[in-house]
Image (cartoon, rainbow, N blue to C red):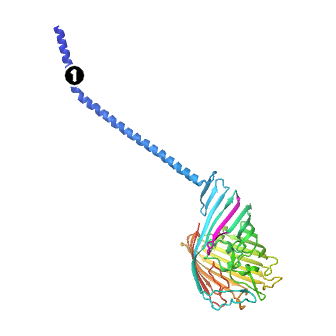
Amino acid sequence: MRNRLLLAIGGSLLVGIAGVVYADATPSSEVSLRAEMAALRAELNQLKVQQDGAYLKQRRAEEFKAMVQDVMSDADTRASLLESGMTAGHNGENFFLASDDGGFRVEISGQVQIRHISNFQDTDDDTDGATAPTTGIVVTTDEDDSERGFEVHRAKIQFAGHIADPRLNYAIRLAVGHDDNDVSADRIVVSYALSDNLTLWGGEDKGPLLREELTSSAHQLAVERTLINEIFTVDYQQGVGLKWDADESLKVQAMISDGSHSGDGATSPNPLTQGGASQAGVVGGAVALSNTSKAYDEDRSDIAITARADMKLEGAWSQQDDFTAGVGEDTAIFIGVGIHYEVGETGDSAFNNNFVSWTVDGSIESEGWNFYLAVMGMHTGLEDDAVIVGDDQDLFGMIVQGGYRIPDTQWEPFVRWEFLDSDDVFTTATDVPYGDTSIMTFGVNRYLHGHDAKLTFDVVWALDPSPLTDAGTGIQADDHNDDEQVVIRAQFQLLF
């Protein structure tokens, strides 16, 4: 019994001692465990944050890629105007739209010329244009000594390209009238390449005669073409034509048309090429014509044939597109000849309107220098079986011009001389003929971006009385005994 009591007391003591020992050890180990757990939690939280950040970055990248794809898809959809797809852009010269397979293409281009002209004319108040002459063409003048003003002389937009086949081409150009803002088409052409060097075309385009007329108004050396060009040009004609690249150095053009200036809205300051029964008034057996520009008379011509040949002696054909020469540009030499023959309407009671025009021209461009020479003539048959209108007439004209592109600059001074021998065609009402007419032009071009953005300033000095008026050049008709007139012109040109 005693032993059992002792064992119980000893066990109790051991249990108590063990409890005391355990109670004393618990706080230290718990702290350590909690610290480890806290560290693990912190590390776990850090890993979770890093994992969440990487996930967010991945999600954001995926969302950004998806957004980029949506934008590109939308852009492709906007650029694809057809279900098969379409490309669009700028080829360095024109804006264009084209199908993916190349079967359809349209190029869009335009021209704007903003111009100021001041004309200073010393006009005789005693005009001689009151009564009809016995021969020749009456010149009626204005008594206003000077005229000036701004105008948008040219505003054009053209659509050109091919349909279904790169060989089947078209071009339609719309022009805004500088005096009335009416819009009309001044070029309508459909062409087909019969071979690599032969093209057939039809519609309304410039007759292939004068090089100055065939050179775009955007690529002229001066503000405007010469008065001589406006007198001798056949301008826009309606008909059919052929273009033949005979070889690397020879190009030939030919056209059958309704006649000089038969294109819609075309006019000429030369009454000889704009005659017709509806434009003549018979006074005492003689016919009087005004020098005012005449619209084309569609009943005036039976048929006309126009042809021109150009030979390249040196350089590239692209250098014939203008009259200027860039510094360092290869030497280019061109020679051209042209002829126009027109047969008047059969049975015309006032004029038979038969006439022939011709030209020979040439140009040289080298190291910034440019030189151009052209001579031209016109023989007009005015006689008719029923009415003798007047003697046959022969006009003769000449143009000489040159310029120089100053190195390391965008400046190009130039000078031009034009000459008209009218063969006494133009007379006053008292039958006093006009003599020869000489006109000088001095000017300078400032190329801001080639012909695409160009400033041109020039002064036109008519050394002799002018028998004709032309709105484009700014020259007004003088009386036969007037002093010279001066025209100051400034122009800004933009092409796109």
Give the side of residue 367 with respect to residue 16, left or right. right
Picture quadrant where residue 375 is located: bottom right
Q: Between residues 310 and 495, which one lies in front from this camera angle?
A: 495
Residue 28 higher or lower than 304, as above or below: above
Looking at the rendered structure, the kind of residue marked 1 is Gly
Q: Is residue 177 magenta?
A: yes
Q: Quadrant of the C terminus?
A: bottom right
Residue sitting farthest toward the left:
2
Q: Position of residue 435 (x, y in %)?
A: 69, 88
Picture quadrant where residue 202 is located: bottom right
Give the side of residue 309 with respect to residue 77, left or right. right
Q: Between residues 373 and 254, which one lies in front from this camera angle?
A: 254
Residue shown at the point (68%, 64%) measured from the top left? 171
Q: Between residues 208 and 135, which one lies in front from this camera angle?
A: 135
Q: Quadrant of the N terminus?
A: top left
Q: Is residue 339 magenta?
A: no
Q: Which residues are magenta?
A: 166-185
Magenta: main secondary structure equals strand
Q: Which residue is mark 1?
A: 19
Q: Position of residue 49 (x, y in %)?
A: 38, 40
Q: Between residues 370 and 85, which one lies in front from this camera angle?
A: 85
Residue sitting farthest toward the top:
1
Picture quadrant where residue 173 is located: bottom right
Q: Position of residue 455 (x, y in %)?
A: 56, 74
| Numbered disc 1: secondary structure | helix
